[in-house]
Amino acid sequence: MIDPSTINLLTLPSLPLEQRSQLPTTPCIYFAIDSEGVVQYIGKAKNLKKRWELHHKGIDLALLGGVKISYLCIELSLLEEVENALLHWFNPPLNRITNLVDKKERSGVFRVKRVLRVDAPGIGAKIKDARERDPRSVDELAKAAGMTRANWYRIEREENDVLPEPTLRKIEEVLGVDFGVKFDD
């Protein structure tokens, strides 16, 4: 199994969305990443090139502009497990419905993921304050947290409407702080 926190999106092979016809024909997990380095969509494909011939998110992604498709070639038997782990780690905006309800068509059963909402006003400012006290650069901190610098800044500016708990916990770990965000079960 792959630990999502160890994936450096900047080092994965990638192509601009417009060049998707040149993608490999191997089993892959793919990431649609916008021009600011934010993962907008994650999916799996037995044949990546074929999957992108008529991808249902192609139009949405084209409208964003500057999107690239990064990919991680992976063993066919691991596609679903790795995709689920990455969806939960990155929580891309264009996958949000998939994250909330995990359809298991093989068994005909729906598994529902419980989502807890916690309002944490000012969390972005707290993260920024802690970052500014840290001697490392934003690039170093973002890399250690498994995200891009652009995504780190979006979190600080509270531009994301959702901050997944694993992402918050990773930021806390990297900065060596506890922001005091608690979840009532």
Image: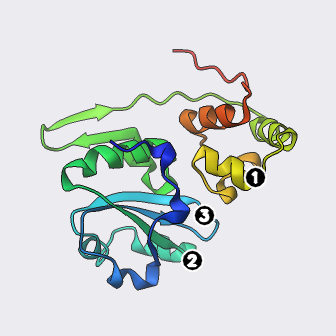
Residue located beneath label 1 in the image: 138
Q: Residue furthest left?
A: 107
Tag 1, which secondary structure? helix
**Three-letter code, disc 2:** Gly
**Three-letter code, disc 3:** Gly
Looking at the image, tell me whether mark 1 or mark 2 is earlier in sequence order.
2
Looking at the image, tell me whether mark 2 or mark 3 is earlier in sequence order.
3
> Where does residue 183 sit, x and y in percent of width and height?
58, 20
Residue located beneath label 3 in the image: 37
**Three-letter code, disc 1:** Val
Looking at the image, tell me whether mark 1 or mark 3 is earlier in sequence order.
3
Q: Residues within 10 Å of mark 1 (few under 14, many from 20)?
A: some
| Label 1–label 3 contact, CB within 8 A | no
Residue plotted at (12% across, 37% down): 107
Tag 2, which secondary structure? loop
- Towards the viewer: 169 or 162: 169
Residue located beneath label 2 in the image: 65
Q: Quadrant of the N terminus?
A: top left
42 on left or right of 75: right
